[in-house]
Amino acid sequence: MSTWRNWAGTESATGVEILRPGSVDELASAVKAAAEQGKKLKAVGAGHSFTGCSVPEQVMVRLDGLASITHADQSSGRVTVGAGTGLRKLNAGLAAFDLAMANLGDIDKQTISGAISTGTHGTGARLGGLATQIVALDLVTADGSVLHCSAEENPDVFAAARVSIGALGVISSLTLQCVPAFLLRAQEMPMPLGDVLHGFDELADGNDHFEFYWFPHTDLALTKRNNRVEAGVGASPVGRVRGWVDDELLSNKVFELTNRLSVRQPSLVPRINRIASRALSAREYVDASYKVFCSERNVVFRESEYAVPRENVVEVIRRLRDWIDSSGERIPFPIEVRVAAADDIWLSTANGRDTAYIAIHQYHRLSHDRYFQAFERIVADYKARPHWGKLHTLTAADLAARYPHFKDFLAVRDRLDPTRTFENPYTRQVFG
């Protein structure tokens, strides 16, 4: 028995039984035994979700024993990995085969199964989230059987299980469609927010990967453009000193200190943000894709992220800015905006529509309730969908109206887990 806590400190579980299966057979036996005993079981990844999606009620399964690349085919780009494989380990392993994932999010602390199950994504107008790179998976269901799922085999389960919040069973392995390893040219520069919003479609469509961070109480945004390099261009990574200053000192250590100052002197936040936004300097470098995509994030915060139809994102940002300006709230954390192409995964936040993601954050020692509630009210006008791993208050009734295949997902769940072995308070909130 032990206590488990997620990274952000928003969720915990005490007195749960911990299982660490070393093989798929052990995992299947553990799941079957728990189901037969009427116990609630949850697989837990790295704990980087802010919601209670992976909180175990009675039995917690750690998949550390299923955490390696088990097959890699360079010619096809198909790679099979254990579900507990961490993204950092996976990226390094793929590089050894001269392969890479086509797109990634901005941190690599999660496990691959946890990342896809919650709908983790990066940015790219022509690219989908991590789950769109999965071509097959094995799912251990409540009766202890292992169900192989792909577009050809059990296609309805495949459509449901790629983003399932762990509600259908425990994923034991996944097969990824990878691409040849590639370099990205990263170009980071501050721009007036007005220029970013006015040219948003051109920026999103004109780059392989585009995102921006806007500092509330200022008129500046940090833009990030990542593009594949031309043939013959080699790597020219950020120098060790510059990288430490930008990514460790300024983005983590100094940022932690300014956030602590914000707790003691909230009135200083606008001035701090203005100084921080003006201090941003342009930089350009070329490095392996996964090194450009992922960065270190050590300052603890709370986050809410919603997916809106891409055509509405500029309007939402303007409304959010108006609310912040009139509310008296002090927000030391930047707001992050990314894009993704439409996909066909039933519970993907980009299902059926080209999507923009707006992520808002608040330092963990500051109250976030009023800010997050206002954000949720604004995006509700656009049938926005919450990131499954980030803070929101929506229920099954709300979500059913926002996902065309919501009932289809519930039907698959009823079939695979009729006794609700894999439920917890969060799944009861979002699925009823």
Image: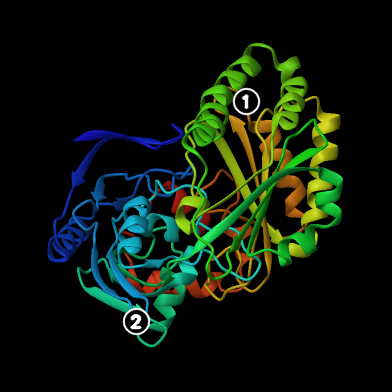
**Place of residue 1 in the rendered image (x, y in percent of width and height, measured from the top left):** 18, 35
Q: Residue at x 51, y 75 (%)?
A: 408
Amino acid found under the numbered disc labelled 2: Ser
Q: Are marks 1 and 2 in contact (CB under 8 Å)?
A: no
Q: How dense is the environment of label 1, judged by Cα within 10 Å: few (below 14), some, or many (20 and up)?
A: some
Q: Residue at x 22, y 51 (%)?
A: 64
Above or below residue 388? Residue 98 is below
Asked whether residue 137 is in view, the answer is: no
**Place of residue 145 in the rendered image (x, y in percent of width and height, measured from the top left):** 21, 73
**Place of residue 204 in the rendered image (x, y in percent of width and height, measured from the top left):** 72, 62
Q: Earlier in the sequence, mark 1 or mark 2?
A: 2
Amino acid found under the numbered disc labelled 1: Ser
Q: How dense is the environment of label 2, judged by Cα within 10 Å: few (below 14), some, or many (20 and up)?
A: few
Q: Residue at x 75, y 30 (%)?
A: 278
Secondary structure beneath label 1:
loop
Above or below residue 251? Residue 357 is below
Q: Nearer the viewer, residue 49 or 123?
A: 123
Q: CA distance from mark 1 to mark 2?
A: 51 Å
Which mark is on residue 75? 2
The residue wearing badge 1 is 367
Left or right side of 273 for 300: left
Tag in front: 1 or 2? 2
